[in-house]
Image (cartoon, grey):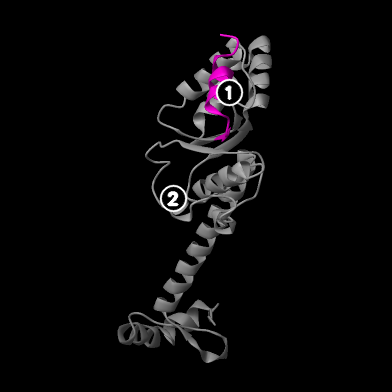
Amino acid sequence: MQVWFARSYWRRHIFSRAIRVSFLLAPKPTVLGFGGSAITSSKRRRAGTRQVERELLQRQNRRLERVLKAAKLRSGAVVEDLDFSSTRGLNKTTLRSLVDSPWVENHHQVIIVGPTGVGKTFLACAVANHAIRHGATALYVRVPRILDDLSVARADGRLARMMSSLARVDVLILDDLLLRPHFDDQAADLLEVVEDRRGRSIIATLFAYDHAVLRRTTTAHH
């Protein structure tokens, strides 16, 4: 509790010596709180540090919420909740070595291959979510849909802007890659998307085609 004296006369003539002595005896005075408890400068510094930490955490949470929303992940999956049962054929050691490594910083690419229904999209979103929580940006797209959107963007003059937005994110999830045969212009658009991402990472999910079917799919309409 602080006390202020309004009359300069009393402050100057009666309390001035006491104030000077107080300052000489206690160059670092404490501030008395209610109930008479002393709040030292050390405690004030700790309180200030906690306040800064709270504000930093709130800022980080707001950023995480914003980046997750922009990523448009199809699933809210996280790597901690993945099912490593033998029926799925997912190797826990391989996955941990991936997410624990600086794969985004090193611009590595991730390809998830498997039959329908094993959770390729779920896994891709979990890996992307982990990258986002460690500071990366990401964007989820389905390849059949994005190829149609690129065709429309070319027609109305938005192609360059759309390609730029796909190139900016740290991690691009290409879900259902090569799900169906591509026409020449679609194949060219897909190649441009990949080429524009040199120095960036891609997570691609790919249906486990027979190799002969895959060759026919990638060469269709050429």
Q: Position of residue 198 (x, y in %)?
A: 42, 26
Toward the viewer: 38 or 213? 213
* Residue 60 appears in view: yes
Callout 2 touching callout 1 (CB < 8 Å) = no
For mark 2, what is the residue? 94
Residue type beneath disc 2: Thr
Q: Residue at x 56, y 16 (%)?
A: 187
Q: Under tag 2, what secondary structure?
A: helix
| 49, above or below 175, in the image | below
Q: Residue at x 53, y 63 (%)?
A: 54
176 left or right of 28 in image = right
Q: Position of residue 69 (x, y in %)?
A: 64, 43
Residue type beneath disc 1: Val
Q: Quadrant of the C terminus?
A: top right
Q: Under tag 1, what secondary structure?
A: helix
* Residue 189 appears in view: no
| 156, above or below 168, in the image | above
For mark 1, what is the residue? 213
Q: How packed is label 1: few (under 14 Cα within 10 Å), some, or many (20 or more)?
A: few
Q: Quadrant of the N terminus?
A: bottom right
Q: How packed is label 2: few (under 14 Cα within 10 Å), some, or many (20 or more)?
A: few
Q: CA distance from mark 2 to mark 1?
A: 28 Å
Toward the viewer: 115 or 162? 115
Q: Residue at x 52, y 91 (%)?
A: 36
| 74, above or below 199, in the image | below
Q: Position of residue 40 (x, y in %)?
A: 42, 81
The label nearer to you, 2 versus 1, is 1
Q: Residue at x 58, y 36 (%)?
A: 139
Toward the viewer: 9 or 200? 200
Residue range in magenta is 205-222
- List the single residue furthest toward the left: 24
